[in-house]
Image: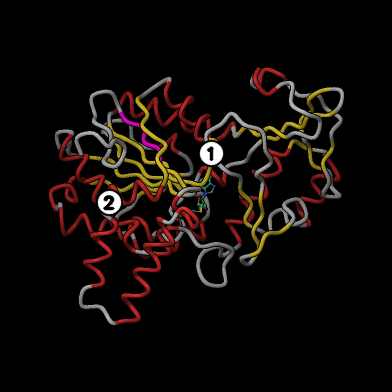
Amino acid sequence: MTPHLRDLLAREGPLPLARVLWLASQHYYATREPFGRGGDFVTAPEISQMFGELIGLSLADLWHRAGRSDPLLLVELGPGRGTLMADALRAIGRAAPDFRAAVRLHLVERSERLRAIQKERLEGAVWHDSIATLPTEAPLLLVANEFLDALPIAQFEKLADGWVLRRVTAQGHFDRSVGANLAFIPDTLRNAAPGSVYERNFAAEQLAADLAARIGRQGGAALILDYGYEGPVLGDTLQAIHQGRFADPLATLGEADISAHVDFGAVRMAAGRHALVAGPVAQGEYLQRLGIDQRAETLRRGASIERAAAIEAARVRLTAPAAMGALFKALAIHAPGWPAPAGFSTAGE
Ligand code: SAH
């Protein structure tokens, strides 16, 4: 745990897990280089250019089908090293220059360090701390890959005599002395066995609702990609990854990548009150519908044997159920009057 967090918890603790996770993740992204070689984890856009390319082309396709609004806000939440958007823009520039010309690029990123990296790769972007300051006058097409998993979750735990809210102590343990607000726990799970954990990502739910409301008003769509499940279900998914290995989340607060699986059921419900929702679809299925097999074949043609093998390995890693193909999922939010993005329905595509 970082000294700053330990001092804060010693002074004011115990504090709710969500509050502590928020502080820990701000510190982590501001100070660490989590991505790629030597980093803590590898994300889909860092595995292959195909990921960003296919997503970019699917947004261009949607824009064409929805009547080519100009200008159009192209937004990414938490762009990391900027790889997804750089690959998307390159593909768009080639295949859909009219879409490229309409695009105004907006990035939501809190880390100054990562903003500097993004600035080198993504010309002409405007940065925001949150979606609250995004322009309101044009439709938006938004992508968020591995963003929601980084938002802070709350955990509720069932004890022999009822549900409590998990709070964190300066010693890096859970405090279980405060009762839970039962309104946050679905009826179907309330009688769970002692020891059961139920997670709520209030920040992700709020974000999904805000985004959907915006899309409902302004037009457009959002693609949300992440690892997760369709809740409500019980389970403790909080995880910390330090230099490619799992670590104790509370012991490494602020020093390791900390995340939780995304409850796509909760995200769909929150967004569905304000806009249309499609999916979730398993990432493997989704990328195959967008044409990853054909794209890989094109890239392999004329490549060296080593390079062709690397392209094939990346394709398998992104799509195979035992790798990222099933745990990772894609969900789309779209405005009434805008069609669903490609890849979300088997009919008519
Ligand atoms: N999308 C990238 C990076 C994912 S990591 C990829 O797929 O490689 C999460 C990203 O979200 C980082 O850029 C991090 O700095 C940013 N981030 C995390 N929490 C945030 C928040 N609350 N507000 C804005 N950006 C945040």
Read off the magenta span.
330-334
Q: Amino acid at mark 2?
A: Gly
User: What is the quadrant of the C terminus in the image?
Assistant: top left
Q: Secondary structure at mark 2?
A: helix
Upstream in sequence: badge 2 or badge 1: 2
**With 57 as the anchor, is 255 left or right in this view?**
right
Percent x, y of residue 90: 24, 60
Q: Residue at x 65, y 34 (%)?
A: 199
Prevalent SS, magenta region: strand
- The residue nearer to you, when weighing 260 against 291, is 291
**With 135 as the anchor, is 65 left or right in this view?**
left
Residue with the mark numbered 1: 229
Q: Is residue 75 above or below residue 194?
A: below
Q: Is residue 208 above or below residue 273?
A: below
- Front position among marks 2 and 1: 1
Residue 333 on the magenta span: yes
- The residue nearer to you, when weighing 44 against 346, is 346
What is the CA distance from the residue labelled 2 to the residue labelled 1? 25 Å
Q: Residue at x 72, y 39 (%)?
A: 17
